[in-house]
Image: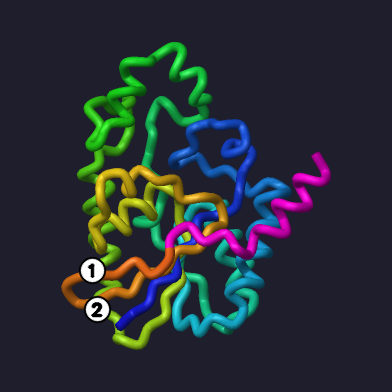
Amino acid sequence: MPLLYLVRHGQTDWNAEGRMQGHSDRPLNTLGRIQAAAIGSRLSTAPLTSIYTSDLQRARHTADAIARYHNLPVQVDERLREVGFGAWEGAHMEELAERHPIELAGWRMDPPHYLPEGAETPQQVNRRVARFISDLRALPQDERILIVAHGLTLRTLMGLVAPWPYQRRREVVENASLSTIQLYPDHAVVMSLNDRAHLVEVDQILAVAQ
């Protein structure tokens, strides 16, 4: 059965600053590039048969750092984009909590009862990710597929193929983390979630530097 390697992109400045990113096309920062190199090394011997990435550069550059170890094309797919946050993109979470506490609380509910102007609805995100999953299920059963995307997009994908308990659907998928899912015709099994073993040395170096 197809095995999915799910990787969130490395850190950007907006991640570090606590800004809403969404469709905004922010590049990796210095730490993000180091994280991308670390996950690339981690997966250098993985038996990948295909690589898919969001079209946003933070994901594409992370995918490139992994693809350099594999003789495979990086396939860009807009369906893997982060959730669009509309008018909130670029805003600090602290700023939103201060200026729009009721709206932010509503947005954080599951499903959200409030959407910023121009934002994607959960239904829109579910539909595009579900179409991507449908394409994956049509691939040969021995496929080993790398997917580089974004925190909420990956949570949506995992929730669609392997429904999680409510509390787990709200877990953060960290930058450059690795999750793996075994995909079956009618269900899926989460094999690992938010694995950061390849980032331990990076974290230790940062802790010393601080």
The label shown at residue 13 is: none
The residue under label 1 is which amino acid type?
Answer: Ser
Q: From what the image shows, is residue 162 above or below residue 95?
A: below
The residue under label 2 is which amino acid type?
Answer: Ala
Quadrant location of the N terminus? bottom left
Q: Residue at x 68, y 64 (%)?
A: 37
Quadrant location of the C terminus? top right
> Residues at badges 2 and 1 in contact (C-beta under 8 Å)?
yes
**Farthest left residue in view:** 186
Give the residue at mark 1. 134
- Whether residue 199 appears in magenta in the rendering, the answer is yes
Find numbered disc 2 in the image and state the secondary structure of the residue it sits on.
loop
Q: Residue at x 58, y 74 (%)?
A: 43
Q: Using residue 84 as the reference point, say whether residue 126 is left or right of it.
A: left
Q: From what the image shows, is residue 64 above or below residue 80?
A: below
* Magenta stretch bounds: 193-210
Give the residue at mark 2. 138
Coordinates of residue 135 in the picture (x, y in percent): 27, 71
Could you say which quadrant of the image residue 166 lies in?
top left
Q: Using residue 81 as the reference point, say whether residue 63 is left or right of it.
A: right
Q: Nearer the viewer, residue 125 or 188?
A: 188
Q: Using residue 143 as the reference point, say whether residue 146 is left or right of it.
A: right
Cα gap from disc 2 to disc 1, whole angstroms? 7 Å
